[in-house]
C-alpha cells in the first residue's frame, strides 16, 4: 500500500479542519495525527485561527451593497437618469417617421415598390456605416502600430515615452489623492469612521 508523504497529510489537515476530508482517508489521517506532534500543533493552530475568524466576523447590513453603490460617483458613460435616453429615442422616432413618410409617398426612386426601395436604402445606409466604421477601426489600429513602432525604434524616443508615462502616472496619483476627502465623506454617509 502506498503511504502518503507529509505534504499530503498537511493538505488533509486543512481539509479536515474545514470538514472536507473524505471518509476513506480519515483512518490514515488519524493514525498519522496520533504519531506526529508537528501536525497536532498545526491542527491546533488552524482550529484556533478558525475560531478567531468566527468570533471576529462582522454582520453586514442587508442594504450595505445598495448604500455603497449609491455613494460611488458616476462614470462618464453611465446614465445618471432615465431622461438621458430622451435624445436618442427622439432621434429614432424622427428618423423612423421620415422613413415611413418616404415609404408611403414613394419619394425614393426605384424600379420596385416604394417600400422595398426604402428598405434597400436603409440597408445600404447600414452597409456604408459598417464599412466606414470597419475602415476607421482598421486605420486606427494601423496608426497605433506605426506610432508604437516609431516609439520603440530609438532609445531617445523610448526614454521620452517612459518619461511621459511616469508624468501621467504622477498626475493620476495627485488626482486620486485630491479626491480622498470625497471618499471620507462617502464613508461617513455609510456610517463608517
Image (spheres, rainbow, N blue to C red):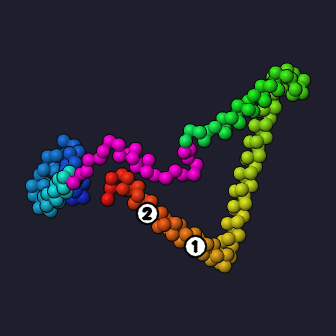
Left or right: residue 182 versus residue 138 is left
For residue 180, side relative to residue 48 (left or right): right
Mark 1 vs mark 2: which is more N-terminal? 1
Which residues lie in the magenta part?
56-80
Which percent across, then down, holds residue 135? 76, 49
| Residue plotted at (80% across, 25% down) | 101
Residue 107, percent from left and from top: 87, 26
Q: Main secondary structure of the magenta part?
A: loop
Q: Which residue is mark 2?
A: 181
| Closer to the eye: label 1 or 2 | 2
Closer-to-camera residue (88/159): 88
Look at the numbered discs 1 and 2 and tell me whether their residues touch, using CB distance below 8 Å: no
Residue 186 visible in the displayed image? yes
Report the quarter where the C terminus lies.
bottom left
- Say which residue label 1 marks: 167
Q: Which residue: 48% across, 66% down?
A: 178
Q: Nearer the viewer, residue 13 or 24?
A: 13
Q: Residue at the spot x=24%, y=58% of the render?
A: 7
SS at mark 1 in the image: helix
Please give the name of the residue rendered at 67% of the width and 39% of the height, measured from the top-left corner.
87
Q: CA distance from mark 1 to mark 2?
A: 23 Å
Amino acid at each position: 500500500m502506498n503511504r502518503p508523504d507529509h505534504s499530503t497529510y498537511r493538505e488533509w489537515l486543512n481539509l479536515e479542519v474545514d470538514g472536507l476530508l473524505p471518509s476513506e482517508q480519515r483512518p490514515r489521517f488519524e493514525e498519522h495525527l496520533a504519531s506526529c506532534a508537528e501536525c497536532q500543533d498545526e491542527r491546533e493552530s488552524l482550529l484556533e485561527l478558525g475560531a478567531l475568524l468566527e468570533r471576529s466576523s462582522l454582520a453586514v447590513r442587508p442594504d450595505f451593497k445598495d448604500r455603497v453603490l449609491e455613494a460611488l460617483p458616476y462614470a462618464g458613460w453611465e446614465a445618471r437618469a432615465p431622461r438621458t435616453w430622451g435624445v436618442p429615442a427622439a432621434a429614432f422616432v424622427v428618423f423612423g417617421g421620415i422613413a415611413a413618410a418616404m415609404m408611403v409617398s414613394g419619394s425614393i426612386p426605384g424600379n420596385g415598390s416604394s417600400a422595398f426601395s426604402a428598405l434597400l436604402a436603409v440597408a445600404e445606409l447600414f452597409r456604408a456605416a459598417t464599412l466606414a466604421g470597419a475602415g476607421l477601426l482598421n486605420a486606427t489600429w494601423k496608426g497605433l502600430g506605426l506610432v508604437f513602432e516609431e516609439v520603440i525604434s530609438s532609445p531617445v524616443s523610448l526614454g521620452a515615452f517612459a518619461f511621459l508615462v511616469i508624468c501621467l502616472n504622477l498626475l493620476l496619483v495627485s488626482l486620486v489623492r485630491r479626491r480622498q476627502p470625497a471618499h471620507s465623506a462617502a464613508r461617513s454617509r455609510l456610517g463608517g469612521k
